[in-house]
Image (cartoon, coloured by chain):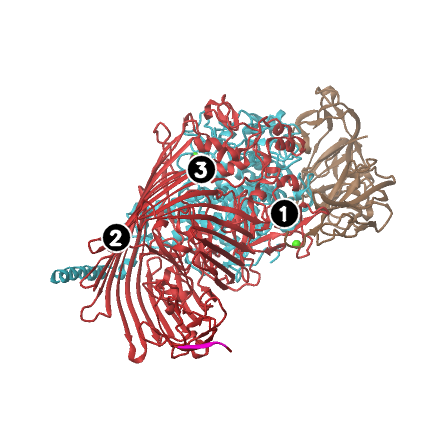
Amino acid sequence: QGGKTISGVVLSQDQEPLAGVSVSVPQTSIGTITDDKGAFSLQVKPTASSLSFSFIGYISQVVPINGEAPIHVVLIKDSTSKLSEVVVIGYGSVNKKDVTGAISTISTKDFQKGAITSFDQMIAGKAPGISITSNGGHPGSGATIRIRGLSSLSASQDPLQVVDGAPFDGYVNPNDIESVTILKDAASAAIYGSRASGGVILITTKKGIAGQTKINFNTQFSVSKVKGYVDVLTGDEFRDYINSNAYFTADYKDLLGSANTNWQKEIYQTALTTNNNLSVSGGLGKIPYRLSVGYLNQDGILKTDNMQRTTGSLTLNPSFLDNHLKVTLNLNGSLTRNRNANQGAIGAAVAFDPTQSVYDESNTLMGGYFEWMRDASTPNPLAAFNPVSLLNQRRDVSHYNRGFGNINLDYSLHFLPDLHISANLGFDVGNTTGTTKEDSTSRNTYNIQGDEVYKGLNNQYSSDFNNYFAEYMLNYKKDIASIKSNINAMVLYGYYDNRSVNDNYASFDYLGREIPNTEQKYPYTLDQSTLISYVGRLIYTYDEKYTLTASIRRDGSSKFAPATRWGWFPSVALGWDLKQESLFKNARGLSSLKFRASYGKTGNQGGIDNYKYIPSYYLSDNTSEYQFGDDFYSMYTPSSYDESLKWESTASANIGLDFGFLNQRIYGSLDFYNKHTTDLLATVDIAAGTNFTNQLLTNIGSMNSKGVELNLGFVPVRTSDLEWTVNLNASYNNSEITKLLAYPDSSYKGQVTGDIEGATGQTIQILNLHQQPNTFLVYKQVYDANGKPIEGAYADLNGDGQISPYDDQYYYKSPWPKWIMGFSTNLTYKKWSFSTTLRANIGNYMYNNVASNQGIAYNMGVNQYLANGVRDVLYTNFINKQQQSDYYVQNASFLKMDNIGITYNVGEVFGLKSSNLSLSGHVQNVFCVTKYDGLDPEIYGGIDKNIYPNPRVYTVGLNLNF
Amino acid sequence: KDQTMVIASSDAATELTASAQTLVLNEENAADQAVTLSWSKPDFGYAAAIDYYLQVSFKDSAFSKISSIGIGTATSISYTVEDLNTLLLGAKYPSDEANDVQIRVLAQVADSLFVYSNVLTVNVTPYLAKRVITYPNLYMPGDYQGWDPTSETIAKLYSINSNTSYKGYINVEADTNYFKITAAPNWDGTNYGTGGKGLLSTTGDNLMIDTAGYYLVTADTKALSWSYTRENWGMIGDAIGGWDDADEVMFDFDKENQVLTKTVNLVAGGLKFRANHDWTLNLGAGAKYGGDNYTITTAGTYLITLDLRVPDEPVVTMTLQ
Amino acid sequence: MKHYFQKIHIIWAVVLGMTLFSCSKKLDRTPINTTSDADVYSTIGGTKEALAKVYGAFALTGSTGSGSSDLAGIDAGTSDFLRLYWNAQELPTDEALCAWGDPGIPDLNEISWTSSNTLLNGLYNRCIYQITVANAFLRATATTPSTFSEADQEDLKHFRAESRFIRAYQYWVLMDLFGNPPFTDENSTIGKVAPQQIKRADLFNYVESELKAIEPDLVAPGQNEYGRADQAADWALLARLYLNAEVYTGTDHYTDAITYSEKVINSGYSLDKNYNYLFLADNNLNNPETILSINYDGNKTQNYGGTTFLVNACIDGSTGAGPTSYGVPSGGWGGIRARSPFPKLFGDDYTTSKDKRAALLLGTDYDITNTTTFAQGIKVIKFRNTNSDGTLPANAGTYVSTDFPLFRLAEQYLIYAEAVLRGGTGGDKTTAISYINLLRERAYGDASGDVTNIDLNFILDERARELYYEAFRRTDLIRFGKFTGSSYVWPWKGGLKDGTSVADKYNLFPIPASDLSANPENLTQNPGYGS
Ligand SMILES: [Ca+2]
Ligand SMILES: [Ca+2]
């Protein structure tokens, strides 16, 4: 044989034998694992000079072989390892191994990088089951986040955002964020009860460590460019189209101009962004602190759009009384100055006649801009407005100041240190003030009132809000070694109050004259809602193998009547560390395996009006009075209400498996879930005569979502010079409405929804039983032999010889993707590091409302002016609206590269030992592969009206630590 | 598209057939079925919603001028003698002669998706329709027509409100004219004679009008009263020579049809009808009492008929000869 | 150490205090700027403001400005009663054709609507909304507060009778248009109990009995405040109801129609000397003819329906002397014009007619070859936002101040004459002719347009000449059997340029699909419209 046998024992720091440690000869395939006594025995070649010991959660060691002497190794726990990581959960944190629910955590090193201005951009594509859809390219416009598909129809589905324990959706500077944790299943989220149906996003900010003063300076410079324009006719094409089409009468042909104006080009710009952040952390004496300031100055790609935001945050987390009293203070503030461009210019630019010039110097009435006029002194009131004038003649500047924070006092009793009493008090206040001014020559505000012409605008607006909460908690944690048990029990009382005030003002013209009939009846409106909660939770761990989590929450909401306002939200979850079982303990290659199962119930009351259960009357406005005799009377108007309005509740079950192979070089998790929402809050048609309206928000119906989520990580290469990591995630979701009627009715046709542009009151989607929410309800288009759609020809689906709504419309696809996938990779070679993130949605469909509204001749010449059309009109030759045709429902599956970047780590600078400088370059919105014809296949809700396009952004950055 | 497209076939066709090729229409059979036109459903290659239109070519126009009748989704239509007659007269086919009538069907799905059937030629002889009046009526047999209540040539009184109040016209030719009023077209029912001046009696002698002319007669079978007023109708206006009294052209009485008629040459201009050379009682456009002038736009020879049989519902026809 | 403990005690004291403070009562949040119904109806002033909504529900789309709506699922500006009622009564007839392609409009133009027509759904819900508001008013005022003076009690009696009148009016509209609507009254509560359907004939009896029952509680003719219903309005609606009774129930009531139209005729109203003044911005002043109107005001009662719609939709920028000449300098929506048969009721060339009612027509292009081309067709400029002295109302822009006459004397003359011709007793034809000649003498300015004899077809035409664009035409054509079928076709009837026959089912509008879905247990669709 010619070898030698090495044996030995592997122990942990506390001298416990470690089973399952892999023992191998470096650079060879020779290896074994330790048994449950920590012992191993391995035959090696005579030349072997060392053995490598590695175990998940511990720092690997390489030990020299000394003859055949037994080797005695103590492995040290790796505090940075995934397995020993502490995971933030609702009202506390647990070790990752004790997690029982479906939780995704994304931390600093996994964040998307580049010109990141909000946290949602950092986590897009990084975890399964989370859909993040940009709300458009306007600076600060944010994103719509959906966790595990849909859970409601009319109530809010936004996840609850909790920042360092404070349930506020305030803006957090991405540079201050340490990690983002997403509670996806009901068992994890149920602890947040009635606000958690959309899932919960826990944001943890960076903290200081006493004794380690660190300064970080980060600066970025970005250039944003529009990626593409809506495909409309050029001036020449438009002239040809109008002139050659018999549909247009001579009156319209006469309106054609001689210019070739690309209106979209006129309204967009190359926009610059600078983003600077400075943070200092360390200890003020014994008090750890972190202070950061940021300044962002971002231009929108729409001309005149700009945002300047200054943020500051301070964290103090001192301990007192021999660490018995821990205090955490978080304060966040932001000052935002927005110049809001008139976004109406976006649609106007798509539709504006390209044969007209931007300017018409003779038109002094309209500031020298071309506008459609009836005569020199009267604009055509029905015509579109010059997009450039919309931008240049408005100056809407707002100031938005917001501060939020909380103080958490956690006291462990001196006589019973396992019992913590804590209080968490927080505030979130903000106010907005602004003015909207328009030039005296602005077409937008041209306002004839009898003999007076009120020109321009000088309006103000303001609002503020004050949200407070207080939470008091008792927490008992005890490790009872004698019965191998660990107990973590908690009870909590919470009080949450939200109050907002919106001020009402009259309108004024540019001379400051009050525009008639704009005075307001009430100086302000006030909205207030309050939530009171009682929570209890027990986390019990037995033998470090089995973890049981059970919680219950009782919430009362001011949005519901006393009889219906209280709701129970229980949950139970089980974790089972299979790796600890003998069956898997010795499984080679399997480095971790854990089974999770959970069930819980969450509630929802978000996004609905505050007082909808209260019968009340309100007085009508000054322009809504009724005349009796010679006097005008305000009308006392009854509001619609639903006395029995109550919680929407979602019960959800989750089964999951976490696994790791080859010493966690491959790791991942697989989850199955089933969510069932009952007492669905939906705005539906009600029987006429039963209320003071015809559609009411009420509890009706139920909905089900099922899905699978897979998250996979690989570390294909890991050497001291080169590390390559890959993350892949994929999730499948199917949501279906299972009930939607107060009375069962086989002839029920569903509740139409999804307003489309181009015709008031027109919808394209439907909510109905056994369908995905917002399924498109359309006619089946008939095509000619060349594949061109035939105007007005649809298949007679029920064969009665006529085309009728509902009967001949069919359910065709939905806006919701079946599959959402993310792919991230990071390659680090010496000082270079390269990363990219890609995302794909599959099975989502989009209604191209831009084409259906602007791809028809009818809208190109009506009301004595001309409007441009999208190029599709040259193909279809449609004259009239064909808005209900399935021709416009298009496959919007896509693959997008969100981000690609490269970083060079310079290392120490200025001779400072602990300093580090890195330089980076990133591109965002790199490419998009899709079959969809419109500008962007990713629009929340699946109806493509004219959107503010997301630009492509090129960023260079510098990050300096010392 | 993600799904199979519905493609409309370009060789859809429809075949029009008629249940009869030669038709001689006459008024006696007005309510009878005349013909059924049927056509096949064209196959557009998919479940199409088709609207059919029956198109009747105007005489000698080869479909450049058509009467179009919306059928809806049915694939056949039946015409009664009367309806077919009305349709053909409207399409300018002359009455009482055999005409080759061209008919086709348009099967339409959308503005740009349709097919025409074959052109079917049917030989039809229309009739000149007489006016059908359905109000309850009384009969006035007398000297002027030979005392025959069963005759077609008889003056009648009508009650448009279906009550006891009747009105109608009688044309008497001699200066002494006796007549009676009968409830039925025979002598078997109630017969009214005179009950004294302006009164009726079921037992009285004959009623009398003493001067030849055209008269409005009223009768009330409950009040047992009656009256008569002479109405001497003519036409006047620049279309017929002028607005002076001297320009007025008086009507003739068409005994067979109990209406007033005249064939005249008209030029473009206004025209009105009036009674007794006076404007007190006149008829204008739309056969409205006191209505606006008729406007004649095409000069030519016209057969003008003034049908006053139901006094509240005068009918004027002007046919360019 | 002790120092710290004291601090902690303070903290916990605060905590305890807040806990107690944060009791469950805090969950009783109530809105501001609103009032409970108990407060509203505790004074006669508040009660009158509630009455203003009972009326205002057919004048305005909502209570918070022209962009607001009491209804959902329909464009706010389109959701008002008159705009929708007018569209339903005029667009399917020979009087009007709308050029807009907005959903619901082409179907009304061509009589091809379905149960999902947005406008019909809006109209149905608007009528029922006003009934629901009236029911709530009657429920809340069932008992009189003890604090009410005798005068207050008298006012309240009138208020309640007027609410019942408004409700009866809307039930009449529903009966005329939809036939068999769901039925609620003051005993129906707000909530989820779906109402039962009422048959058209039963609804006729209900409306009749209500109108008769409230007669003594209404103010005497002409004695109420402008804009509020009096006994003459009650009789006028009864006369209209009886004239159409045969359509609604199969049994005629022409004698009753004569009785009640005569009561109105003899109650002191007289014809306005100038026909066109009835439709001008100051028609609330010196108007001896209008019995009840829907009131609008360009400053105080703004919306995008009502007469604002009527004035703006009937003109565009190039109509006549331009929008300013019609009192809407920033308006002119270019939608509605007449089909050719209507102007021809004034003669083949209406411009040569002596009839001054024809002077409110404009243009020479009779034929509409393209329904969406507003330039085609004779324009109707009957409703205008100018004052009778030619001036414009204050702040004239788009909103219109002209009040819409729901009931005016002229209609009662025509009802009387028609009922006589149809065999009603208690009236006579000579009087009927004299009433018609009153209308014609106003129209002609002298006796040259007088008639000596009238018949039913003349009445139908004269109603069109007198009442055109006042939302009567559909009901009239149905009463004369000419709306559906082939006895009378007009351009674009049935969707063909020359017009074609349409099925008899269209004599009733369908119950909206949305309500059939929301109330499936109780509602049955009208015949011919499927389930
Ligand atoms: Ca069908
Ligand atoms: Ca007014």
The residue wearing badge 2 is: A282
Which disc, if any, is residue C112? 1
A801 magenta-colored: no
Q: Can residue A913 be seen at all in this image of the molecule?
A: yes
Residue A271: mark: 3
The percent position of residue B88, horizontal first and vertical second, equals: 80, 41
When the figure is inspected, residue A178 is found, relative to residue A229, above or below; the finding is: below
Pair 3/2: label in front: 2
Q: Which residue is drawn at 50% across and 77% down?
A: A2
Chain identifier, colour brown: B
Instruction: Give the alpha-carbon distance from disc 2 to disc 1, as whole Å.
Output: 77 Å
Whether label 2 lies within 8 Å of ligand 2 gets the answer: no
Q: Give the range drawn in magenta.
A: A2-7
Amino acid of disc 2? Gly
**Residues at marks 3 and 2 touching, judged by CB atoms closer than 8 Å:** no
Q: Quadrant of residue C364?
A: top right
Question: What residue sits 34% from the left and 38% below the top?
Answer: A434
Rendering colour (chain C): cyan
Q: In this view, does C163 lie to the left or right of B264?
A: left
Of residue C8 and residue B294, the one placed in the foreground of this image is C8
Label 1 vs label 3, nearer the camera? 3
Q: Amino acid type of disc 3?
A: Ala
